[in-house]
Image (spheres, rainbow, N blue to C red):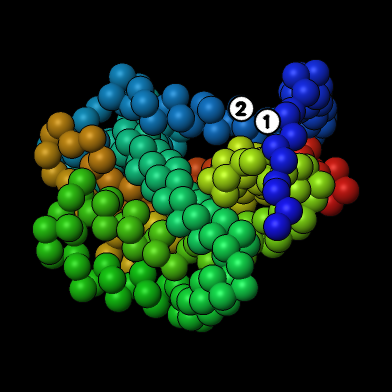
Amino acid sequence: MAKTVAVPLQPGAALTHRRQVRSLRRAAWQRFRRNRLALLSLIYIGVLVAVALSAPLLAPHNPVQSDIRAAGAFRQAAWIDDANPQRAGSWTYPLGSDSIGRDVFSRLLFGTRVSLLVGLITALCTLSIGVSVGLAAGYGGKRTDNTLMRFTDVVYAFPGLLFFIVIQIAFRDSWAGNLLNGLVLLFVTLSIVSWTNVARLVRGEVLSVKEREFIESARASGAGDRRIIFRHIFPNVLGPIIVSGAYIIPGAIAAEATLSYLGIGVRPSVALDAPFPTSWGSMILDGSKSWESQPWMLLGPSIVFASVTLAFTFVGDGLRDAIDPRQQ
């Protein structure tokens, strides 16, 4: 029986590989910087993250506290005049107030927290499930591949929006539905059926990468399956995973806004010190009921929601072109 001889890796080869990786990263960053729209979108997302973190400092009013003087009047935005002094715009309320005197601008700032958190946490959960299934299916052999891919097909066939609605309604009043105003349940709900495309993408990349020469060299040198997967295969499929994550985030934000608009998303809070008092979807729902009296209750969250989803989409396009220029 032939004996496998471990081939020692040359130190110079490892150093050359690291230099090549740094060179590829530098070239990818330069290509991304040339995409002005993607770069501006990344800066805009960074500004939104800063706004979400410093919302208590930036908000001129408490987002859940009512001004009795403005209650019932639907105060207009600051640049809009009105014959009724109670409805006339004032820079004390830049985007006006709602029917119970809450500042729309302050609620918009705090809503940034919910939307970004839902997008980022859901993307992390979705990528974790999808990448794990994809790596196992692509590397585990024919039987494992068939089993996991058939399960993936079953999950993929289930209507996503219908599943979101059923789970939110079924568990909304349970202990899980009350955690962080329903955010935890929302993370789980959006992640359970959103990982299938990631799993398929990662599986295809793994099937392509594991047949290359450097994987055979790693096996010949005595590397185990775990080392091959996490040291050699995973870094080579990381680029498509990052791009996929950039597209998952706006989808999760849109799903949260849809569920909140239907009244089964994040629970609005009335506590004065609540970290997540409202979401953009809830604000759009409230604004749709009173858009004639106070249009900025609807226009404000709608514009910000559209801009942030477009920003993440542009960043995803920029990352795709930077990591793999052949896809341009």
Of 151 and 126, the residue lying toward us: 151
Quick one: label 2, few (<14), some, or many (20+) residues within 10 Å?
some
Q: Say left or right for 226 vs 216.
A: left
Visible residue check, residue 265: yes
Of 242 and 61, the residue lying toward us: 242
The residue type indicated by label 2 comes to Ile
Visible residue check, residue 70: no
What percent of the width, then of the height, locates residue 157?
Answer: 51, 81
Q: Say left or right for 135 vs 128.
A: right
| Residue at image point 80% right, 50% down | 212
> For mark 1, what is the residue?
40
Q: Which mark is residue 43?
A: 2
Classify mark 1: helix, strand or loop.
helix
The residue type indicated by label 1 comes to Leu
Of 314 and 204, the residue lying toward us: 204
What percent of the width, then of the height, locates residue 146?
Answer: 57, 77
What percent of the width, then of the height, locates residue 6?
Answer: 70, 37
Q: Say left or right for 33 vs 267.
A: right
| Residue at image point 57% right, 45% down | 224
| Residue at image point 58% right, 71% down | 145
Q: CA distance from mark 1 to mark 2?
A: 5 Å
